[in-house]
Structure formats: C-alpha cells, structure tokens
Image (cartoon, helix red, strand yellow):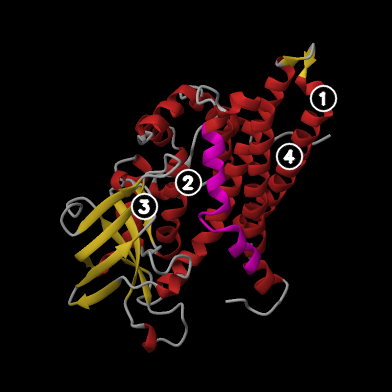
Amino acid sequence: MPGPDPYRELREGVRKLCARFPDTYWRELDEQQAYPEAFVRAMTEAGYLAALIPPEYGGAGLGVAEASVILEEVHRCGGNAAACHAQMYVMGAILRHGTPEQKQRYLPPIARGELRLQAFAVTEPEAGSDTPSIRTTAVRRGDRYVISGQKVWTSRVEHSDLMLLLARTTPPDQVRRRGEGLSLFVVDLRGNLGKTVHVRPIRTMINHHTAEVFLEDLEVPVEDRIGEEGQGFRCILDGMNVERILIAAECVGDGDYFLDRAVAYAKERRVFGRPIGQNQGVQFPLAQAYARVRAADLMRFRAAELYDAGLPCGPEANMAKLLAAEASWEAANAALQTYGGYGFAREYPVERKFRETRLYQVAPVSTNLVLAYLAHNVLGLPRSY
C-alpha cells in the first residue's frame, strides 16, 4: 500500500479553489477565446503563483515538486494552468540569474499580483526550435539596447506586464559556439504595446492566447538585461528543466481528469442491458492508460526531487515530459472512445480537454526533440542535427 500523500493539504487547497471554476467556466472561456482573468486572480491571491518565489521576496519558497502538484490539481479539476505555469517558470530566470536589485524590483510585486510575468519571447518564424538561429537583434547604444525583430508563439503577451525576451547581441560569425551571443532581457510591456511592440494574435484550436510579436526599435535599459551579455541562452536552458517538470505534472493531471470521467461514464452508461464498463474492450484501454499515467507520475516526482536537491535532472525532466504527454494523450483517446459520439459534443467535458492535451506532444518541446536529446546526451549516439 502506498504511504500517505505528503501533499494532501496542498492538493485539497487547490481543489477547493478550483471548485469555484467548474467545467462550464472553462467551456465559456474556450468558446469566447477569453483569458481566465478571474481564475488567475484567485490563484494569485491564494499565493499559488508565488510558490517558487523565496519568502524574502514575498513568496512561499516551495520547491518544484510542490509547484508541480499545484498545476497537476488544476488540470485534474478540469482547468488549464497555462497562465500559471508560465509565470512559475518564466520568472525562474530572474530567480537564478538576476541581480539582487532585479530580484527586489520584480519578485515582490509579482508575488503580490501587482505585476504579471507570463510571456516568454524566444521562438521565431524561421528558427523554430533551433533557438541559436534567431535573428532578433539587440544593439547596445550607451545605457540602452535597441531591439528589432519578430517572435512567434509568444503566449499571453497581451495579458502580461512584463515579458522575457531573447535576442542576439553578437553576430553568429563572431561567436565561438552557436549558443553564444544571445542575451536575455526583461521587457516592460506597459507603454510599449502598440508603439515599439506590436502583437498579432494567432487563433488556434485551443484557447491559448498566443501571438506573433513585432519589435521595432524597442529600447530596453541595460539594467534590464538578465545575466551576462551573450549568455542568455544558458539562462533559459536552466529553466527548461523546470518547464518540462511542470508540463509533465499538468499532463498527469489531464490523464487523471480523463480517467476519472471516463470511468464514471462507463459505470453509468448502459447498452445492451449492462454498463459499458463491464466490457473488456472498454476496461483495457482505460486500465492501460491508468498504468502509463502512474508511471509518468513517478518520473515527474523523480525529476522534481533531483531538481530540488540541486542535482542534474535533464534526462529525468525530459523523460517526464515525454512520458506524461504520451500518457495524457492515451488517456484522452481512451476517454473519447468510452464516451463514443457524446465525446465530440461540446456540452460534455472531454471534448475541450481532448484538444488541449494534444498540445503537449508538440510544445513546449516536441516529442521528437526529446527523443533526440536522450539519444545524443544519454545514449551517446551521433548527433542527428
């Protein structure tokens, strides 16, 4: 028998909050392509979005394991924690690489909910996942950088006060390694949107508030550069393990969401004089999905345990994301098949979640790139790119 859940109180607190935001809340947002303003405000006021901020800056000072549990429960309750996980891992660059002055300037108001940092501008149309190939440039002019270029798939930029931005400060032919010559900046969007920062929303199959961002001579003070000039790629690499662990937790939550509802429906729905859950054709896909969700769950906690102990966790974080994204998608398919035709009806809860959980096979890192990482860095196979 498994031991007592060390996160029971944390889970109960998140579930209590999420009970105020039922499936109907998320369905209406999805139909309107609207931002979950009330939910984000409630999560902020409860202190959950400041989970990783140290107490001296007004946060809870929790570990990544606890942060992942928070997001897991949001998804198990039927919500979408994209805006929440973004703030958690995006601000990690400030936590790990910011100066004491930057931490004092940004972290307390983020913890209080006075500032939102939910946008991360890295990807570009031509570069895609090949981050060292980005073309957005930041030119130093005295005590400021002037930044011009284009980003894509920058989510929640219209709903954030601050945005982290990766730009090239040294031409590629003047660096020793491909990952060098990129710098990371905090951009204050207030006062710049519609002037030097222009946003064009991208309508997608899920309600994710993502957009193209066009930068035209955007001026950023030197004191808003995070870390050393030219070392921005290293700064964001540090946060990628956190991102993968948090996404894995959300996928675990999605998997349990699908299983909870599919099992309940299979017990209630009667065809040919008996519940459909009595048929092994319904039982076995759900049981298989359950086993895979639980296995992914274990890898998520292993990765979080290593990260919180200050130990290398790249392989574990990547495997957690890979396994959890696949497990949640398998659970989604099993749930949709259990519901049959009703699974496609928007009045039933699985339709929206089915679309949402499919994202994690592609983003924030695609399944194939995780496999390439494991092949190159763990198995020692020749690099494929």
Residue 85, labelled with which disc? Answer: 2
The answer to whether residue 151 is magenta is: no
- Label 1 sits on residue: 279
| Type of amino acid under label 3 | Ala
Percent from the top left, x then y, of residue 243?
Answer: 52, 54
Q: Which mark is in front, 1 or 4?
A: 1
Element at badge 3?
Answer: strand
Q: Calculate the distance from the C-alpha at mark 1 to the C-alpha at mark 4.
A: 16 Å
Q: Which residues are magenta?
A: 352-372
Pick whichever of labels 1 and 4 is earlier in the sequence: 1
Judged left or right of residue 202, residue 343 is: right
- Label 4 sits on residue: 289
What residue is rendered at 56% in x and 29% in y?
344
Q: Quadrant of residue 8?
A: top right
Q: Calculate the distance from the C-alpha at mark 3 to the C-alpha at mark 1.
A: 46 Å
Eyeballing the image, is 190 above or below 277? below
Pick whichever of labels 3 and 2 is earlier in the sequence: 2
- Label 3 sits on residue: 119
Judged left or right of residue 272, residue 6 is: left
| Type of amino acid under label 2 | His
Q: Nearer the viewer, residue 362 or 248?
A: 362
